[in-house]
Image: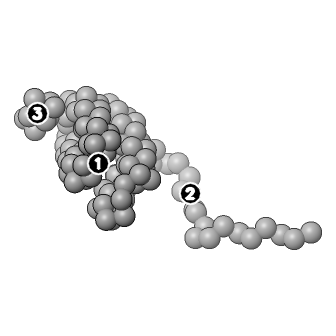
Amino acid sequence: MANLQARFDRETNGVHKAKLIEKLGDAQLEEARHAGKAGDYNAVGLTLEKYRDNVRAALDALKKQHPDAEKQSNGYRQLQMHLRKGIREVDETLLVSPEDYKPPLQIVRQDLVGMDEELLKMLFPRRPVEHHAATPPAEKQP
C-alpha cells in the first residue's frame, strides 16, 4: 500500500489520480477491515481518515484540471463510484466499533457524504433537487 500511496501522491493528472483511488482505496478499505477484525480501532480511524484525505485530493485535482464534470466526466465517475463503496465501508465500521471511536468515524462519514453530494451535483447539474423532510410524515389513521 505504501507504493500505491507514493504513486498517488506523485500523480499530478487529476483523472489518473481519481483512477488510482480505485486501487489505493481498495487497499485502504481492506487494511481498515483487517485492523477492525484485530480490534485496532485507532488504525481503523487513521486509515479511513487517510482514505478521506486521498478522495479529497483527487476531487480537488479533478476540479482544478477539469472543472466541467458534466462534459468531462472521466475520473469523476470512477471517484464517485468508489466513494459510495467507501461510505458503505465506514457505515459498516460504525456499526461494530466501540463508542469511543465512533465520533471521528462519523466525521469521516460526513466528509465522504459531502464529497459524494458535491460529485453528484457536478456530474448531474440539471437533476431535480431532492428535498428530504426533517421528520417523516405521520401515517394517517383511518
Q: Position of residue 33 (x, y in %)?
A: 32, 39
Instruction: Name the colouring of the figure.
Output: one colour
Q: Nearer the viewer, mark 3 or mark 1?
A: 1
The answer to whether the residue labelled 3 contacts the one labelled 1, judged by CB atoms less than 8 Å apart, is no
Q: Secondary structure at mark 2?
A: loop
Q: Residue at point 36% right, 59% down? A: 98
On the image, numbered disc 2 is attached to which residue? 130
Numbered tag placed on residue 2 in the rendering? 3
Q: Position of residue 123 (x, y in %)?
A: 41, 42
Q: Position of residue 25 (x, y in %)?
A: 27, 36
Of mark 3 and mark 1, the one earlier in the sequence is 3
Q: Secondary structure at mark 1?
A: loop
Q: Residue at point 24% right, 49% down? A: 40
Q: Position of residue 99 (x, y in %)?
A: 37, 64
Q: Which amino acid type is marked by label 1?
A: Gly
Query: Is residue 71 at least partly visible in the picture?
Result: no
Distance between mark 3 and mark 2 Cα atoms: 40 Å
Q: Nearer the viewer, residue 56 or 121?
A: 56
On the image, numbered disc 1 is attached to which residue? 39
In this view, 45 is above or below 132: above
Q: Which amino acid type is marked by label 3?
A: Ala
- Location of the N terminus by quadrant is top left
Q: Bin the neighbour count of mark 1 within 10 Å (Cα to Cα): few under 14, some 14-19, many 20 and up.
A: few
Query: Is residue 104 at least partly visible in the picture?
Result: yes
Q: Nearer the viewer, mark 1 or mark 2?
A: 1
Quadrant in the rendering for residue 71: top left
Q: Residue at point 25% right, 32% down? A: 27
Q: Which amino acid type is marked by label 2?
A: Glu
Q: How many marks?
A: 3
Q: Nearer the viewer, mark 3 or mark 2?
A: 3
- Location of the C terminus by quadrant is bottom right
